């Protein structure tokens, strides 16, 4: 009996080693790269398929960056230009100001799209986008494009860094100071906007604080403002309420940093962040037991994000078959993923910015303080039709205008955007095998009978118009 047990152990160990040596395989690799970045290329999937799940996750986390590699617009380092009161401007000056704001807005969005395509760490950009929708601010209210750029750099610097560090920094971020009216928060006349969103949307979530907590926290942040000459954060001691305050049962001469530390000490904060990340990377259906387990990992790591993401990406739920294809791609994921996967290098990034806006995700301009709701909200009769129109146009041999006056990414002129023959040459085998493998890469599921299309370009167009292409 002992001999049999030893044999079984040896066989089990051998199979484990063999599986480790063989790597996770194609389907797992495709799933991991799609969830942690944008749609992968065939070469990226093949390289990742040779790794174990843990090896692949460690490689993705190790590749994280904290700075953009794409040169930003030339004006980002200029001193901020604060908009004058419109009533003091002539009609000509108003139109010039409006055109300049539109131009810079488009340049900034196009720059971020280019960075998402050029980055060596797609997960960094995915997390920067996640934080952009968590710590919401909008250029429509902030008005100063330089400040929106600086905030984007801040979010990237801690995208996979430390949540506590990021939370303290975002409270001082000039774009956030303007967006949530901290500049008007002063002793005797507290503005509660930032304190409320700090608790409801940034840390605890609704139901874990009282109105009195909000009022007291607002007093703690009085005097937090910015210097208009430089656009930098500035604390005004004379405008600060230095009296005694009580927030979530903690009393003292609290300032803003004290309040943030109190919020970080609450278990609800870690669970709130983990729940949002679960819906971002795993499933719209939340496993509360798993959320609590991962939240404990998060708190034990002192809010370091890499330990949390490692545990999340190695969880059984992340790899579960029932959770694959359960998430809807955001407009940005759909656009960037398509350009990256198919190598549409000639596509002007300004077109992506225009297309993203038409699909409901206008970068640097979330709809409200709660951000884009995501999930099924991305898909309705209007946006689904627009998605299909844009995807179909990407695979046309036509040039497309930046302004989109004839519809999102409408075609004008003639030049090949996509070389279907070159794309297919990246796959081995005969035509039938190539089509099967292309279908597997693009739709991320077990191969089905290849679509009936004699022309390769039409075959690819049918793939991206398949409902499964909208999922990840």
Image: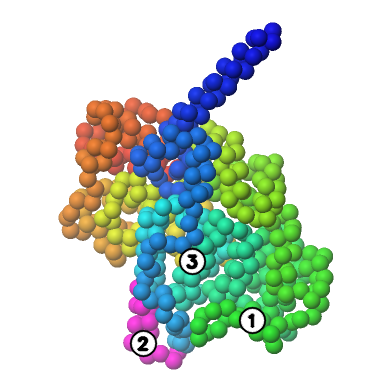
Identify the residue at image location x=64%, y=79%.
224
User: What residue would you read off at disc 2?
Assistant: 93
Identify the residue at image location x=62%, y=18%.
9
Tell me the SS state at disc 1.
strand
Q: Nearer the viewer, residue 332 or 54?
A: 54
The span from disc 3 to disc 1 (Cα, nearest Å) is 22 Å
Identify the residue at image location x=41%, y=52%.
120
Residue 47 appearing in the image: yes
Magenta stretch, main secondary structure class: helix
Tell me the SS state at disc 3.
helix
Displayed quadrant of residue 433: top left
User: What residue would you read off at disc 3?
Assistant: 153
Identify the residue at image location x=40%, y=70%.
105
Magenta stretch bounds: 87-103
User: What residue would you read off at disc 1?
Assistant: 235
Residue sitting at the far left: 414
Measured from the top left, where is residue 101 in percent x and y? 39, 76
Measured from the top left, where is residue 184 in percent x and y? 62, 82
Measured from the top left, where is residue 19 in percent x and y? 50, 26
The span from disc 2 to disc 3 (Cα, nearest Å) is 31 Å
């Amino acid at each position: 009996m002992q001999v049999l047990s030893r044999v079984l152990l040896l066989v089990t160990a051998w199979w484990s080693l063999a599986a480790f040596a063989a790597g996770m395989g194609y389907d797992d690799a495709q799933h991991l790269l799609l969830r942690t970045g944008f749609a992968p290329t065939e070469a990226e999937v093949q390289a990742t398929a040779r790794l174990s799940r843990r090896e692949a996750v460690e490689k993705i986390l190790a590749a994280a960056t904290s700075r953009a590699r794409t040169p930003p617009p030339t004006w980002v380092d200029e001193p901020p230009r604060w908009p004058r009161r419109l009533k003091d401007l002539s009609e000509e000056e108003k139109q010039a100001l409006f055109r300049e704001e539109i131009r810079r807005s488009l340049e900034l969005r196009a720059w971020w799209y280019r960075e998402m395509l050029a980055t060596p760490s797609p997960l960094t950009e995915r997390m920067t986008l996640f934080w952009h929708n968590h710590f919401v601010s909008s250029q429509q209210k902030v008005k100063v494009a330089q400040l929106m750029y600086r905030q984007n750099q801040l979010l990237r610097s801690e995208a996979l860094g430390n949540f506590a560090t990021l939370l303290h920094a975002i409270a001082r971020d000039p774009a956030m100071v303007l967006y949530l009216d901290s500049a008007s928060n002063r002793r005797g006349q507290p503005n509660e906007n930032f304190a409320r969103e700090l608790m409801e949307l940034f840390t605890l979530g609704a139901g874990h604080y009282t109105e009195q907590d909000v009022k007291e926290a607002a007093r703690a942040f009085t005097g937090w403002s910015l210097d208009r000459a430089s656009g930098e954060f500035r604390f005004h001691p004379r405008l600060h309420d230095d009296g005694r305050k009580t927030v979530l049962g903690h009393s003292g001469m609290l300032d803003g940093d004290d309040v943030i530390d109190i919020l970080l000490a609450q278990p609800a904060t870690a669970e709130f962040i983990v729940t949002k990340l679960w819906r971002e990377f795993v499933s719209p259906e939340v496993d509360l037991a798993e959320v609590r387990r991962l939240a404990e990992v998060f708190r034990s790591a002192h809010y370091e994000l890499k330990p949390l993401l490692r545990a999340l990406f190695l969880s059984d739920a992340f790899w579960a078959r029932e959770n694959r294809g359960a998430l809807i791609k955001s407009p940005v994921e759909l656009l960037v993923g398509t350009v990256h996967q198919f190598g549409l290098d000639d596509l002007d990034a300004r077109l992506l910015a225009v297309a993203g806006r038409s699909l409901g995700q206008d970068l640097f301009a979330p709809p409200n303080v709660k951000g884009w709701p995501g999930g099924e909200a991305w898909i309705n009769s209007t946006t689904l039709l627009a998605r299909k129109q844009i995807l179909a146009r990407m695979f046309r041999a036509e040039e497309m205008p930046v302004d989109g006056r004839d519809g999102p990414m409408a075609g004008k002129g003639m030049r090949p955007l996509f070389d279907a023959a070159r794309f297919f040459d990246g796959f081995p085998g005969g035509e039938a095998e190539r089509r099967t493998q292309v279908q597997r890469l693009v739709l991320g599921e077990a191969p089905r009978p290849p679509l009936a299309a004699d022309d390769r370009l039409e075959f690819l167009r049918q793939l991206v118009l398949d409902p499964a292409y909208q999922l990840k």
